[in-house]
Amino acid sequence: MAGKPYFEIYQEGLKVGERRSLANAFLAGSLTHRQWRWRLVGGNGEPMACGESYPDRDSAMRTISIIANLDGAEVREVNG
């Protein structure tokens, strides 16, 4: 039986308990290193969607809130 989908939020390249530092971001060579990201995980544990990077946790949480409240949103098919 599949579980309920859920959001995960994390800092890119940051391990649990590790602190963010400018030096580590520079050494990693990524402009988004240590920025916040989210992903939507399906009830089967597989990722379904992910977001862009955000400079702070609150920005990522605002986006999650918007997405979570899109019940009944219009779907538009467009030319690719």
Image: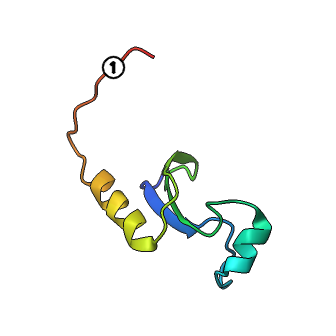
Image location (x, y in percent) of residue 43: 48, 51
- Residue at x 35%, y 58% (from the top left corner): 63
Give me the residue at 28% from left, 55% from top.
Answer: 66
* Residue at x-position 67% and y-position 78%: 22
Q: Position of residue 33 (x, y in %)?
A: 65, 65
Colour scheme of the picture? rainbow
State the SS at label 1.
Answer: loop
User: Is 10 drawn above or below residue 70 in the view shown?
Assistant: below
Examine the image and state in which quarter residue 76 appears.
top left
Residue 27 image point, x, y percent? 79, 70
Q: Position of residue 39 (x, y in %)?
A: 51, 55
The amino acid pointed to by label 1 is Glu
Q: Residues within 10 Å of mark 1 (few under 14, many from 20)?
A: few
Q: Quadrant of residue 80?
A: top left
Position above or below: 36 against 80: below
Looking at the image, residue 43 lies above or below residue 61: above
Task: State the residue position of label 1.
Answer: 77
